Amino acid sequence: MFRNQYDNDISTWSPQGRLHQIEYALEAVKQGSASVGLRSNTHVVLLALKRSSGELASHQQKLFRIDSHMGIAIAGLVSDARVLSNFMRTECMKSKMMYDRPMPGSRLVSLIGDKAQINTQNYGRRPYGVGLLVGSYDEDTGPHLYECLPNANCLEYFAISIGAKSQSAKTYLEKFAKDFGEIDVDALIMHGLHALRETLQQDKELNINNCSIGVVGKGQDWHLIEGDRLKAYLDQLEAGAAPAASAEDLPQGEAMDTE
Amino acid sequence: MFRNQYDNDISTWSPQGRLHQIEYALEAVKQGSASVGLRSNTHVVLLALKRSSGELASHQQKLFRIDSHMGIAIAGLVSDARVLSNFMRTECMKSKMMYDRPMPGSRLVSLIGDKAQINTQNYGRRPYGVGLLVGSYDEDTGPHLYECLPNANCLEYFAISIGAKSQSAKTYLEKFAKDFGEIDVDALIMHGLHALRETLQQDKELNINNCSIGVVGKGQDWHLIEGDRLKAYLDQLEAGAAPAASAEDLPQGEAMDTE
Amino acid sequence: MFRNQYDNDISTWSPQGRLHQIEYALEAVKQGSASVGLRSNTHVVLLALKRSSGELASHQQKLFRIDSHMGIAIAGLVSDARVLSNFMRTECMKSKMMYDRPMPGSRLVSLIGDKAQINTQNYGRRPYGVGLLVGSYDEDTGPHLYECLPNANCLEYFAISIGAKSQSAKTYLEKFAKDFGEIDVDALIMHGLHALRETLQQDKELNINNCSIGVVGKGQDWHLIEGDRLKAYLDQLEAGAAPAASAEDLPQGEAMDTE
Amino acid sequence: MFRNQYDNDISTWSPQGRLHQIEYALEAVKQGSASVGLRSNTHVVLLALKRSSGELASHQQKLFRIDSHMGIAIAGLVSDARVLSNFMRTECMKSKMMYDRPMPGSRLVSLIGDKAQINTQNYGRRPYGVGLLVGSYDEDTGPHLYECLPNANCLEYFAISIGAKSQSAKTYLEKFAKDFGEIDVDALIMHGLHALRETLQQDKELNINNCSIGVVGKGQDWHLIEGDRLKAYLDQLEAGAAPAASAEDLPQGEAMDTE
Amino acid sequence: MFRNQYDNDISTWSPQGRLHQIEYALEAVKQGSASVGLRSNTHVVLLALKRSSGELASHQQKLFRIDSHMGIAIAGLVSDARVLSNFMRTECMKSKMMYDRPMPGSRLVSLIGDKAQINTQNYGRRPYGVGLLVGSYDEDTGPHLYECLPNANCLEYFAISIGAKSQSAKTYLEKFAKDFGEIDVDALIMHGLHALRETLQQDKELNINNCSIGVVGKGQDWHLIEGDRLKAYLDQLEAGAAPAASAEDLPQGEAMDTE
Amino acid sequence: MFRNQYDNDISTWSPQGRLHQIEYALEAVKQGSASVGLRSNTHVVLLALKRSSGELASHQQKLFRIDSHMGIAIAGLVSDARVLSNFMRTECMKSKMMYDRPMPGSRLVSLIGDKAQINTQNYGRRPYGVGLLVGSYDEDTGPHLYECLPNANCLEYFAISIGAKSQSAKTYLEKFAKDFGEIDVDALIMHGLHALRETLQQDKELNINNCSIGVVGKGQDWHLIEGDRLKAYLDQLEAGAAPAASAEDLPQGEAMDTE
Amino acid sequence: MFRNQYDNDISTWSPQGRLHQIEYALEAVKQGSASVGLRSNTHVVLLALKRSSGELASHQQKLFRIDSHMGIAIAGLVSDARVLSNFMRTECMKSKMMYDRPMPGSRLVSLIGDKAQINTQNYGRRPYGVGLLVGSYDEDTGPHLYECLPNANCLEYFAISIGAKSQSAKTYLEKFAKDFGEIDVDALIMHGLHALRETLQQDKELNINNCSIGVVGKGQDWHLIEGDRLKAYLDQLEAGAAPAASAEDLPQGEAMDTE
């Protein structure tokens, strides 16, 4: 009962110094289906669980291309994600036109934070209800993986997961994260699939419909892995290839030309 | 009781990370009379149940022409639908004038999503109270069927239904959807009528007054099927032509020149 | 009790997906004295019951001329009606000046709908509290009869009634509506008077003071029927001329030059 | 209790389709001291009861000149009346400057209605708390008497009264109104004084201090009747000159040059 | 309890047709220390009781010069009075610059009324919490005394008092007001002092610190009476010079050159 | 309970004609540490008690320079004081640039009053939470001491104190104020220290850290008294130099060159 | 219960003259992980405790570079800190461009105070939820250490700590602060680490991941101390080097070239 007195306005502090509306918006992210991000020294891989709106629909889109060197995975309100991804695309285009260079990931993430912060301070707005994983690669600074949340916090990660049951994925990632730096992109994808599988409900399995993979990295523009290529990874996952404790132990599937 | 503390403002998150006003607006769609959409590889068919405002009125209009290559079916607040359809027509005209080409369906649906999202974030607005099925066809990308909802989500479907008792129609559509790709437009219409019939109240029947059909597809601009042609389909429906499990089994009615 | 939580703001959805303020505004229409509209293939007749503000005042005006080819009858808040009729007159003048042609009824009705919709979506506004019957005639499309309600719905009718006890008038109209198409304007007026009489309170009678008739149609600009001519119709009504089941049976009163 | 849920906002409909704030503003008019208006075929007479603010003040002004051909009597909030009368004077001046003709009474009354309607629809405004009787005369259309109320309704009357105990005055006026058309201005004034006397409290009498009379009509610009001339009418009233049932019977006081 | 439902918003009518916030602002005037105004045929005298903010401060200013021909006395919120007196001074300067003549008192009072009315109709404003007595003199229309209240009412008076215990002063003034017209300015001042003394608390006396007198009139610009001259009047008051029932009986103090 | 219904909005009058928010803001001044001001015929001295934010911080600044001829002492919200002092400095600079003369103290104080009044009348603002003592000196009008409070009242004083326990200081000042006119600046400072000491909590003493003194006057620009000079005064205070009842009795400390 | 009536609006005073929303925002600072600042006569050192968002993320950034001569440490909402640090960087750039000199710390701190004050007075805003320690150095005025809080107060300190358990750090700092003036930067850093360690939870230790140090001072631009250099300080801390009561006693670690 007490809590409710401070929680319906973004511009009202609770006596404990909290802004409840921001915390509730973070809940919206936790209700979205999970997304996972991992980074090696050369690549960023984003994976997402797609919820079907029934048999009749294509699955919901969870990965979005922002620019040739950048993509995002989302968890939460899809319509808010579209607003933010439109904003990101526009900024990337402006960067190209005005400075003739790709927008650095760190700069774009900072702009998102600024945009989101405004919604946490002004009466009559609401915080965005979506979390973003941003993967980018450029020659100068290499691969980067960021998480942007409704509280306007944007942090860089080696590996991270957001959305429903993302804690299970994080537990997996923390176990193997020390290996991610040096492994190749296939191994990185396999780790990502293992982590994503942890977020599934009891009796569900990953398949080519409910699972999206996006990759960006050295020599590779942002692209999705779909169809047969996706199936190959999933088969490997199903084949019981328990991830080895370190990358060296990973069974190297047949080399896939991902460039 | 608890729920009510968060549900009267579009810009207030509930502690569970939900925006109740959006969910209530989705209820408004569920109260509208049903609309059904189906897609083959060459055509999109939209069907709608029209409620009569009494014997004295023409039935309510449920299908609207947006452009020569695009039409919509609605469920929910008619006045909100008019606002959105005006918006869509204007955008289509702008596309023709500025780029000399028809507005792609996916682009227009994205604009509707953006427009609807604004109403889900700003204080003092309300989400639109109408759902749209958008059918479009162009030579490059073929036929498309989209659903746009008050939560600003716009998804592509093979077949879908919105409005009152739309779940019954969906159940029918899911059963036969695998066949829709290759069947001709007559068979697609018959499937649509079967699905629409599922949404009727116990003692009602489809007739030329309470039923609208719109078609767009390869070689066919958006047009309504009315009068004798509509009656022919309805007669066929009443003749007990239970839809075959697959399109091949469909009794091919006399060929109708739909071009 | 429960209902009240959602009903005092136009921009708040109830959990059932309803906008209560719109429904309450519709109540304002139901409290206005009744208006009746009928359409033959050549004419539109609008009739209205005028409430007296006491013996000292002229009766309240219920019929308004919009343009030479168009008039309206109202039920509900007179001051809101004036705002809307001013708007309609201005639009008609603009049409004449800019396009040198009379504003089509369907177009004007659509503009009213757009104007009324705005008041159903924006915080701090209220829906209009008046219903309109719009009768128009032009050479190209013939006579039209529309009903515009506070919910921004505008529908075309063959015959319709709004306001207090309008259901009784509708019952009459539904009984005879199938005949209206081919009958002459005198017979149409007599049917209208019969319908309007149904909305009277128990011990009241129609007379030249409490009853207004407006006609527009083929070869006839919008004009009111008043004085002796109105009295002639009322005498015929009082003479017990029960409306025949079909127009052919109608006693043809002495021909009145209505042109 | 129930009523209160809808009555504190001008832009909120009650479930019964009423706008309570408008009705409450009408109460403010009923609390003002009474004003009476009457119209013959040639003149309009406005009379008003003035409340004293104590012995030290001149009595409150209740009649206002708008233009040479127009005056008003008020009941309710004096400060709101001043705003409206300023508005009326400005409009009359504009009419003279732009069209070189006096503002027609019907036109001005319509403008007041529009101005008042705005205050009945927009959040954060309140309806005006004053009622107006408007008397005007022009050569083309003769004398006119209008009543303008906070609900933005403006009606034409033969005779009318507003303010405290105005019902008693109306009862008198209804009894004799049929005679007003043909009587001269003196007789009209006497009828007005009889009506106004009906609104007095038990032990009060009309006198030259608490009673105002304004006249406009054929050959007479708007002017007040004051001092000796007013006294002459009051003496005649006190002399027991019960108004005859019809004007012919009226004792003709000595002819007064009212031109 | 009931009253409170309508009394916290200036733009909300109570069911009785009252605006409680205006009435509460009038209370603020009643709490200010009293001011008194009197008018002869040639002069206006304003007197005010000054409350001390303690021994260390000069007494609060209660009389303000507006122009050479005009001054005011106040009761209520001093800060609101300053806003209004600044406004009055500016208007007087504008009148001199634009029309090369002093602002007529009646015109300025009307402007104050308009300014105050705005604060009684718009949401989010509050009525001014101060009452003004305005004294002015010009050659054409002679002396004038006006009272302006938070309800935007501005009335002309022969003599008036506002503020705490002003009713006692009014009782005195009503008793002698009939004499004020012909008496000289000294006698007028003495009457004013007698009236002001009535508003004192039980054990207080008028002295040169708590009492202000301002005069404007024929041949005299607005000026304050202070120091020895004020003391002379006060001595005369203390000398028991009970005001005679009519001016002729007034003990004529030694002639004071007030020009 | 009752009080709370009117006290949370600056633009709402209580039924007693009070604006509670203004009164609450005055409480904020009473909670600030005390400031004292005194005026002789040639100088103004401001003194303030500084609260330490702990041992690590410099003490809070309580005296501010506005211009070479003017300084202020504050009690209440420091951040509000900064806004007001910035405003005062800007106005002083404008005066110098535009009129080439120092801003008169009375004029600046009037501008502060106007600025503060706006915050007492408009919805959504709050009154400033700070009281100011303003000391100024110019050749034409000599020294002036003003107090400006959140209620927008600005009064001139001979000596005054604001803030916590300021009543004790006032009691001292009232006792000796009659002497202040003719004494020299050293004696004035000693009186000020005696007064300020009255506002200390039981076991506290004035020292060079918690006490500020500012002086402006004939031949002296605004300057602070600090370090050794401040210590000399404090030593004198501690030496038990009880202030004599009149200035003549004051032990004249060694002459200090304060120019 | 009582408190809640005044605490949800920044522009509402409580009856005790408090603005609760400001106090609640101060709580947000107290919940942030601690930051510590110390100043010698030549250097300012800022230290901060970084909270990890889990093993996968880099630690949260707590120290920010503003300009070559200035840096900040924060406690509280990171997104608010970013807004303020962006503002500070922009102001520093403007200072360089317009005046060709570094922004003085005192000036920038004053601008932050002004910016923060606005959020404490205007309806619909909220106070910033972050505290800043600002360290700056310039040749003219030497090193400065400021604290800026949500209440818009900005004070200069010799040493200070904000955030969770900052009281423990303050207790340490107060004990040794008298020594800070003359010690070298290494000794200053060691004192800072001792103070920061006091804010740790029971079983935590400072390490190179959870601890940030920034330095600016004579001959040293703002720079972070990281990696091996940071480790050396931490080793020294762990080696039990209890800080001597005065700087002379401090074990001088090997000289580190900090220039």
Image (cartoon, coloured by chain):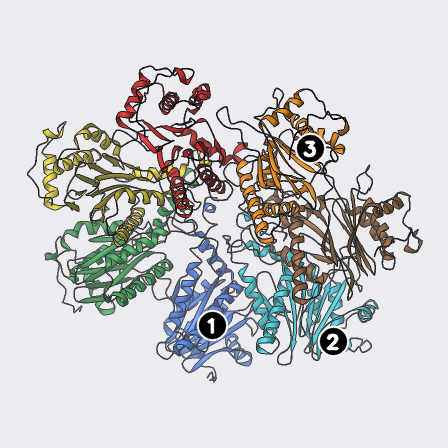
Chain colours: A blue, B cyan, C brown, D orange, E red, F yellow, G green
Looking at the rendered structure, the kind of residue marked 1 is Arg
Pointer 3 residue: D185
Q: Nearer the viewer, residue E165 or C16?
A: E165
Looking at the rendered structure, the kind of residue marked 3 is Val
Q: Nearer the viewer, residue A223 or C209?
A: C209
Q: Which mark is residue B67?
A: none
How many angstroms separate mark 1 from mark 2 (CA)? 39 Å
Label 2: state its secondary structure: helix
Residue sitting at 61 percent across and 72 percent down? B92
Q: Which mark is residue B185?
A: 2
Left or right? Give the position of A54 relative to E201: right
Looking at the rendered structure, the kind of residue marked 2 is Val
How many angstroms separate mark 3 from mark 2 (CA)? 83 Å
Image height of E110 relative to C69, above or below: above
Q: Nearer the viewer, residue G60 or B209?
A: B209
Q: Chain of mark 1?
A: A
Q: Nearer the viewer, residue A142 or D151?
A: D151
Label 1: state its secondary structure: helix
Residue sitting at 24 percent across and 67 percent down? G100
Label 3: state its secondary structure: helix
Q: Which mark is residue A89?
A: 1
